Each structure stands twice: as structure tokens, then as C-alpha cells.
Image (tube, rainbow, N blue to C red):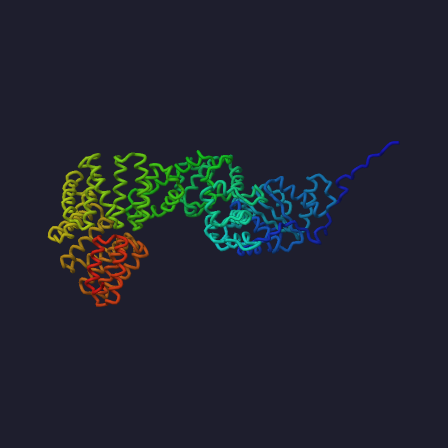
Amino acid sequence: MAVHAEQALPPEAYGPIPDDAADDGVSNIPITELFVGRDTALDQLDAALTTPGGVVLRAVSGLGGVGKSALAARWAGHRATARLRWWITADSATAVDTGLAELSCALQPGLAGLPAELKRERAVAWLAQHGDWLLVLDNVDHPDHIGPLLDRVRDRGRILVTTRRATGWHGRTTPLRLDVFDPAESVELFTRILTHDGSRETDGARELCDELGHLALAVEQAAAFCHESGTTPRAYLDMLRQWPAETYALGPANADSERTVARIWRITLDRLADMPLTGEVLRILAWYAPNHIPRTLLDGLAPPPALAAAIGRLAAYSMITESPGGTLSVHRLVQALARTPQDDDPHRQDSDITHARQEATSRLAKAFPTDVESPEHWPQCQAVLPHADALARHSNPEHDTLNLSYLLDRVARFRQDQGAIEAAITYFLRAHAIDQRALGEDHPDTLTSRNNLAGAYESAGDLTRAIPLYEQTLTDSIRVLGEDHPDTLTSRNNLAGAYESAGDLTRAIPLYEQTLTDSIRVLGEDHPNTLRSRNNLAYAYRSAGDLERAIPLYEQTLTDSIRVLGKDHPNTLRSQNNLAYAYRSAGDLERAIPLYEQTLTDSIQVLGEDHPNTLTSRNNLAGAYESAGDLTRAIPLLEQTLTDSIRVLGEDHPNTLRSQNNLAYAYRSAGDLERAIPLYEQTLTDSIRVLGKDHPLTRTVWTNLEAAGGA
């Protein structure tokens, strides 16, 4: 007896998906139990996706891990009102087709036996004929992957896209760029995950979220690990700093291993592997500060078209952000990963990261101006300074190179000139250590870095460390370079200045005189170093009370400085100030006060209100007013100078202490001992602590306090 095989119905026998298939509501939107903030972004989605009319497309772009999918799920699950709300993982054209096929089965379960391509076609046909639906296309890698779908349903429904691609949407939609959490939001998310089943230690949560750059995935990953393992926020922060590669890969035991920060960004870079320059650019940018990176720091890395293409690709995938002003930004966690070697990650090989660090150092060293004293160079110094600080902070001192020493020396000189003495000393110490290790004690660059370190100590009033360093440097310079080498002359001049600062004029003046004689013979009358040497000798004469020699020397120096350097050069302003001071010391206030007033006006215009030399100029003008008995002008000027000095230089800077002493003296001159004596007492306490009891300024304050009737 024959057995007849059952025949399957042809596909068309299934018929189209019924019109009412979604009437009872169909949704597969993920549930978002832990969600914080994002109110503005949610409101923007409301405004975009509730507009009447044909199909509405809205793309949410941003860095991997920033929280795009969570935002989409929150809006779709809590604010969208469509009867059909369907989530599709859309990271490829194939994935989009799979998601649409699954939608057809959700609308009509009987279609399960159809081939995938027919199920996809049934779903698209239904969407094209109906309007009350929302598709969430998550993690779209390229607009072309969803182009065919958009073309078919252009007059219907709503589509919400999440993507790392910030570009390529022209003509379809304007992406909503999602940024990292506000600090308060990231701390709230971290705390809610950490404490969701009971109280936990939360101290350090804000610092940890700061370190993670307030990136949603990183905060969630850290909080879940801390919750599961019992690790405190501060302990996790320590792990991040000591074992970054291992910590970035951590997650709770039941988490998706593909959803760690390290893995997500590796996948992104895998998609850029056809352009290796993108990885090199990212690794170089990783050593700079996260924001306001001058694009010019990448000039010459590759031919301009190739470099522009690499930057464009990185920006397209939200790995970097381009600003209209010609600067770039990189999330600090992207930077941290790009600086951290990982053997199994082709984008984070140790040799590539070392090369990037050296390249970043070289580029900063070339970008930081050599002449840090000229105001026209200060904007460039300020633009590059945060990136030099970041490079120094992230570089292991064991790997320091001569290029870094060269950079740190100039950064330190700029900081010293701007009054940030402690930061300058830190960099001078590191630069000198590099030179000693790489070049040896007798190399000219090592002598120079030792001299500069001594100068920073002198600026800080630490003469007990400055003078021995200067003396050692001069001895070595004579032995290595010779008596007449310009660096030897500079070293002798600086040692004389330190002796003068210590009140030892019997050693300072002969050294200054010898330096000036040698400078004229070796460098010439008009060399800037000769002008500086003449100014310094005049200052020493004035300090010794020898105004008959000081004033003509100051006048000659000012005339020559204006002719050689220009009237707005900082050294010219310094010379002008010193001549005014000499006139005042001679009791010639009719010449001193107008010159002081002119110097202050010029200093504000050239140097700015907060430059240390401007503060000194204001202090000196106030002193001249005081000498003229005009305390109504002197005291407000001294009060302003002290306030600004504390803000700009810090409470312990020697110039701040001088300003404090001078204000106390003015109060005393006005007969206001109730304000003078406490200020003297505070200044004396601070001077002893900062400068030592034998420092000339400390002795001056002590004498003034006794004269005012204090203890």
C-alpha cells in the first residue's frame, strides 16, 4: 500500500500578516530598571518622535558605552505609545534582516516555518502599510545597513536608531549626540547599583566616577563588580591606577564578557583596522589632556589628506570629537585604555604605545615656545600647557627621555614666570634627573637644568638649597665650559643674585661687577644678557645704598633696553620699574611716581592684571604713594595687591608675604595698629615657616612688628 507524503503549503498560502496583528500590543523592548538622569535627551526624543506625519527617524549617536541603548530602551519602554514597539540589534545588514524576521513571527506566529527572507519581507510589507509602530534599531554600524528598510517604510511609523556613527546621516536625520553623565548622575547610578540590596561603603564613589569619566558602561561595570566582590570604591580606584589593563576587563561573574569597556572599544577599532593611521592617532592623543587638543599637534604625522581621513573616521565612530575651533577631544577612559598595553589586543601592543608616547612627547616639545617670557607666546604656552601636564602625569619616570626633559624645562620656566613656583620646582627636578641619568653630571644641558632648579628654589625663597646649587653649577661651568662661556656668565650672575637675596652684598657686588665686565667683552654692550647684568648690578648698588652709582646705571639700562628690546618687552618694564624704585629711594618722588604709574599701565596692557610682575608694579606704586604720605591711595592698592597675590601666587609665595608686610606697614603708618599688628604677626609666622627665621624678609617683618609695638 502506497504511503502519500504530506505536501507543505506554498508560501503564498500563508497570506499577509493581518492588519490587526498589533492591536493587543506587541513589544520586546528591554526593561530598564536602573536608569538615572537623561531628562533633556528624553525630552528631545519626545519632541522628535511624536511629530505627526510620515516616518520619523531619530538617531542617537555617541561613544561606545555612553548609554545610547539604555536611553533608547527607557524612551521606548516608558514614553513611547505605539502599539507595536520592536527592538532590533542592527549592527549589520544581516542582523537587521534577522530582527525583521523575528518581528513577523511576533505579529503572526504561524509564519515561523517560512524562510527567513520571506519572513523579513512580510514584516516590511506590514510596516509599510501601517502607522502605529516604533522600531528601535540598536547599534547601527553604517546608515547603509538600514537604508533599504527606510526606503520601504518612508511614509509610516517611527524609527529610533542608536549608533556610534556621528556622520553619514545627511539627508535622513540630524543625530542627537549623547554625552557622558553629569557627575551627580554617575554617582547616583553607581550608588544605586552598589547598594540595591543593602547598605555598602560608598566613600570614594565621586572620585571613582571622575576617574571613569562618568561613562555609563564603565560606572555600571565598576559598581556591579564592587557589589559582587565586596570591593570598596577606593579599593577599585587603586586597582584602576595600579593594574589598569586587568581592571578595565573586569565585570561581575554573570555579565556579558563582550560588554566590558575594553572589549567594546576594541570592536570599534577592529572596524577601523583598514586604516591603521586611526589607531596611531588615537594612541598619540591618549597622552594629552582629554579636551582642547590642538589639531596642529598632529601636523606632519601623515600627508594631510590621509590625516584628515583618519581623524574623520575616528570622529565618525565617536572615538574623538572635533570642535569648530580646530581642537579635538577624547574621552579620558578611551585615552587610559589606549595608553595601557594588552597582549591579546592588536590595538594596544606595548611597542605601539611606547612609540606613541615618544611621538606625543616630541610633538609637544616642538609646540611649546622656547621664549616663554615674551607675552606674544603666552597664548601658545597656555594652549599646550594642559597637554604637557597630562603627558608628565601619565608617563612613568623610568621611561623619561631627553625630549621630555626639554619640554619640562620650558614648561617649568613658564610656570615660574607666571608665579606657580611649586609646580615649576617639580618639573625642574624631574628634568634635571633625566639629564643626569642620560647625559652625565658635566654635560652643558645638565648644568643648565641644575641652574634652573636653583633659580626656582631662589624664587621660592629657599636660599639654603639655591645657593649651594648655584655655587656647584658655577664651579662646574668654569671647569667644563670655561670662564667666558655665556652659560658661565649666566651662572655667575645668578649666584650673585642669590647672595644678594640672602643680604650678602659683600659677595654679590664684586661678582656682579665681574659678570658685567666679562659680558661686555664677550657678548657686547647690547646683548640682552649684558643689559640684564647691568640692571642687576644697579640693583645691588641701590640695595647697598649707593644711589650715585645705581641711578645712572639704571637710566643707561632703560635707554638701551627700549632701543634693543622695545618698550613693551618684560625686561624693559622691569628696568623701568627698577629705575622708579631708585628714584623713590633717593627721595625723588616727582620722578618716581609718574614712572611707577606708567609701568603699571604698561604692565597691565602687556602682561595682564594677574602677572607676578604686574602685582609687583602695583605694590611698588602703592609704596610710592605711601612715601608721599598719600595713604588714601596707597592702602586700597596694597589691599588689592595682597588679595590678588594670594589668589594668583598662593599664601606662601615670598611676594605674597612681602605684600602682606607692606600692607601691615601702611596700616601702621595710618595709625591703625589694630589691623597692623595682627597682620605683622601672621606674616612673621608664615615667613618663619616658609623662609626660615634667618631670611632677610623674616628679619624685616620681625623688626617692623617690634616697631609697631608687637611681641
Answer above or below: position of 128 versus 352: below
Task: Locate residue 575, reporting x and y percent.
Answer: 20, 50
Between residue 480 and residue 75, name the one nearer to us: 480
Where does residue 447 sit, x and y in percent of width and height? Answer: 25, 38
- Left or right, 256 with respect to 289, comes to right
Where is residue 395 drawn, in percent x and y?
A: 39, 40
Front residue of 692/160: it is 692
Among the 4 quarters of the image, the one containing residue 490: top left
Please tell me whether residue 666 is drawn above or below residue 185 in the rendered image: below
The residue sitting at the left extreme is: 548
Image quadrant occupied by the N terminus? top right
**Can residue 559 be seen from the camera position used here?**
no
Asked whether, in this view, residue 262 is left or right of residue 647, the answer is right
The residue sitting at 12% across, 52% down in the picture is: 546
In this rendering, position of residue 408 left or right of residue 476: right
Outermost residue, top direction? Answer: 1
Q: In this view of the protein, which residue sits in the foreground, 199 or 72?
A: 199
- Residue 249 in sight from this viewpoint: yes
Which quadrant of the structure image shows residue 308?
top left
All told, the count of numbered labels is 0
Quarter of the figure with the C terminus = bottom left
Residue at x-position 27% and y-position 50%: 460
Q: Position of residue 405 (x, y in %)?
A: 33, 39
Most foreground residue, 594 or 128: 594
